[in-house]
Image (cartoon, rainbow, N blue to C red):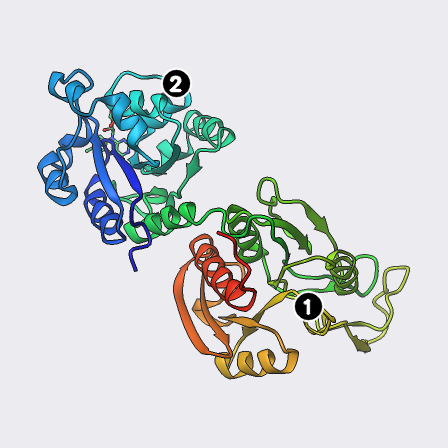
C-alpha cells in the first residue's frame, strides 16, 4: 500500500557524512508513494552528488538560491509552497543553528523560513558537536517551535568515536514521516496509558518494585498524542518527563494506579496498560523502619487489583490493550493473558537476557489478538511506539467503525 501517495516531501540534505543515507531515504519515501524534491546545500554536494538524488527523485536537484533558471521554474517560494512537509536529513550542526536563528543565507534555509509546512530534522554529527551547549540550545529553540527532531541515535560514529549523533536509519525516518501524515487519526479520542513500575511499601524506606523504566509507556503516550488523541498518562515512579502536552497523574502503588485508572476511565476510548504493576503487595507496611533484629524475616503478600481485567470487565469497556512482559514462553503466556483478561490486544515483550525490554532504549514487540500474531520486530521504543499506535488505530476502527475521516 502506498501510504504516502500524493504527499509532497521536500528533502533537504546538508553537509555531513550521513548524506549518503539520504539516497536510501529518498528511495524509501518514493517507495511509499511520496513525491520528493531535493534541496542540497553546497556542503552536501561534497558528500553525495546531486546527480544521484536527481536520478532517484526523478527531478532536478535544487542547490543555488540565485539560480536564474530555478526562479523561473521552481524557486524557493514555489518550493516552500509546494511542500506538505520539509524533512532535513541529515541536518548538520550548522544548518540547525541557522534554522534556530532564522538565518536565510542559502536555498535550504531560505525555503525553510518561507514555508508554512511542518519541519522535521534528523540531526547527524559527531557526538561532541551534538552535546555542545550551543547545539543543544539550538535544538531546544527548534523543539519549542514544534520542529520535530528525529533522533539522533547513539552508537559508533564515522569519526571513530561512540555516542549520540548518528542519523537515524532511512526506514526509521520514513516511519516518522508516515506517522506525521496519520497524525490526526485519533482526534477527539480519549486514551489512558499506564506506565512505569509500581512501588509496594514494606516500611517507610523499603519496598517491592521492578526494573520497568517507563520508557515504552511514555513513548507510547507521546505517539498516541501525536496521533491526535487526548492522552492521560498514569505513571509509577520513573526518572522521565512526560511528553509535552500529555497530563500525567503520578502514583506510587498498584492500588493507587488502580484508583487513578478507575477514576478516569469513564468516557475513555482506548486503554493501554504498559505499566509493570506489582501482582502482590505486603499485607501491611509498618509505620517505622523495620530494624535488623531477627535472623529471618517473612513478608506476607496479598494480591493487588488486576487493573487490566477490571477495565476489560466494565459494562462499556474501552478498546483495551495489555502488555505481557515474560522471561520465558513469551507468546504462550501472552495468549493466555489475552484470553484470561478478555482484552482486545496484547503486546508481548521479552524481559530477560540481552533482549530485555526493561531499562533499555529498544524493545521487541509481538502483537496478539483474535486474528493471530503480528511481529513488530526490534527497534527503538520511540519507533515501536509509533508502529504500535498505527496497529492500535487500525484495530480500534475495525471494532468501532464510526471513523468520520
Ligand atoms: C569530512 C567532513 C565530515 C563532516 N561531517 C559533519 C557531520 O556529520 N555533521 C555536521 O554537522 N557537520 C559535519 N561537517 C561539517 C559541515 O560540513 C560544515 O559545518 C558545513 O558548513 C555544513 O554546511 P551546511 O549545513 O550548509 O550543509 C563535516 C565536515 C567534513 C569536512
Q: Left or right? Give the position of 401 relative to 172.
A: right
- In percent of the image, x 8 and y 37: which residue is there? 51
Q: Left or right? Give the position of 227 relative to 176.
A: right
**Residue lying furthest right in this view?**
287
Q: Picture coordinates of residue 318 (x, y %)?
A: 65, 65
- In percent of the image, x 65 and y 61: which residue is there? 197
Q: Is residue 11 above or below residue 390?
A: above
Q: Picture coordinates of residue 199 (x, y %)?
A: 73, 61
Which circle, 1 or 2, is nearer the viewer? 1
Read off the residue under disc 2.
Answer: 102
**Label 2: few (<14), some (14–19) or many (≥20) C-alpha neighbours in 10 Å:** few
Q: CA distance from mark 1 to mark 2?
A: 49 Å
Q: Earlier in the sequence, mark 1 or mark 2?
A: 2
- The answer to which image quadrant residue 285 occupies is bottom right
Read off the residue under disc 1.
Answer: 317
- In percent of the image, x 23 and y 53: which residue is there? 31
Q: Is residue 99 above or below residue 211?
A: above
Task: Determine whether the residue tagged by mark 1 lies in a helix, strand or loop.
Answer: loop
The answer to whether residue 2 is visible is yes
Q: Picture coordinates of residue 272 (x, y %)?
A: 60, 62
Ligand 1 within 8 Å, label 2 CB: no
- In percent of the image, x 43 and y 38: which residue is there? 148
Q: Left or right? Give the position of 217 relative to 90.
A: right
Task: Determine whether the residue tagged by mark 2 lies in a helix, strand or loop.
Answer: loop
> Which quarter is ligand 1 in?
top left
Instruction: Judge by depth and name the residue closer to the eye, 400 or 257.
Output: 400
Q: Picture coordinates of residue 338 (x, y %)?
A: 58, 78
Amino acid at each position: 500500500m502506498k501510504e504516502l501517495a500524493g504527499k509532497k516531501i521536500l528533502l533537504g540534505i546538508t553537509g555531513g557524512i550521513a548524506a549518503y543515507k539520504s539516497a536510501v531515504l529518498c528511495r524509501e519515501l518514493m517507495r511509499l508513494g511520496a513525491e520528493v524534491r531535493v534541496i542540497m546545500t553546497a556542503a552536501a554536494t561534497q558528500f553525495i552528488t546531486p546527480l544521484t538524488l536527481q536520478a532517484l527523485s526523478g527531478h532536478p536537484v535544487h542547490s543555488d538560491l540565485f539560480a536564474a533558471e530555478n526562479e523561473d521554474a521552481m524557486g524557493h517560494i514555489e518550493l516552500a509552497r509546494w511542500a506538505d512537509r520539509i524533512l532535513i536529513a541529515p541536518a548538520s550542526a550548522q544548518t540547525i543553528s541557522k534554522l534556530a536563528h532564522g538565518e536565510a543565507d542559502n536555498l535550504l534555509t531560505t525555503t525553510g523560513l518561507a514555508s508554512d509546512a511542518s519541519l522535521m530534522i534528523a540531526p547527524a554529527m559527531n557526538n561532541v558537536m551534538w552535546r555542545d551547549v550551543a547545539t543543544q540550545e539550538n535544538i531546544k529553540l527548534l523543539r519549542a517551535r514544534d520542529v520535530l527532531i528525529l533522533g539522533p541515535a547513539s552508537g559508533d560514529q564515522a569519526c571513530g568515536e561512540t555516542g549520540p549523533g548518528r542519523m537515524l536509519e532511512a526506514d526509521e525516518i520514513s516511519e516518522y514521516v508516515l506517522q506525521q501524515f496519520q497524525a490526526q487519526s485519533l482526534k477527539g479520542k480519549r486514551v489512558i496509558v499506564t506506565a512505569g513500575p509500581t512501588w509496594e511499601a514494606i516500611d517507610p524506606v523499603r519496598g517491592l518494585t521492578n526494573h520497568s523504566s517507563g520508557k515504552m509507556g511514555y513513548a507510547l503516550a507521546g505517539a498516541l498524542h501525536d496521533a491526535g488523541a487526548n492522552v492521560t498518562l498514569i505513571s509509577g515512579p520513573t526518572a522521565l518527563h512526560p511528553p509535552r502536552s500529555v497530563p500525567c497523574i503520578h502514583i506510587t502503588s498498584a492500588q493507587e494506579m488502580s484508583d487513578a485508572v478507575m477514576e478516569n476511565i469513564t468516557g475513555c476510548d482506548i486503554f493501554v496498560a504498559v505499566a509493570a504493576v506489582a501482582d502482590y503487595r505486603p499485607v501491611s507496611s509498618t509505620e517505622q523502619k523495620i530494624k535488623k533484629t531477627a535472623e529471618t524475616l517473612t513478608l506476607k503478600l496479598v494480591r493487588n487489583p488486576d487493573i487490566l481485567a477490571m477495565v476489560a470487565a466494565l459494562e462499556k469497556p474501552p478498546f483495551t490493550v495489555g502488555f505481557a512482559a515474560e522471561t520465558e514462553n513469551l507468546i504462550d503466556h501472552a495468549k493466555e493473558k489475552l484470553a484470561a483478561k478478555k482484552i482486545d490486544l496484547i503486546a508481548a515483550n521479552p524481559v530477560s537476557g540481552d533482549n530485555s525490554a526493561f531499562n533499555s532504549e529498544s524493545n521487541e514487540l509481538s502483537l496478539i489478538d483474535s486474528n493471530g500474531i503480528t511481529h513488530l520486530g526490534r527497534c527503538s521504543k520511540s519507533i515501536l511506539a509509533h508502529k504500535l499506535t498505527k496497529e492500535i488505530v487500525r484495530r480500534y476502527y475495525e471494532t468501532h467503525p464510526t471513523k468520520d475521516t
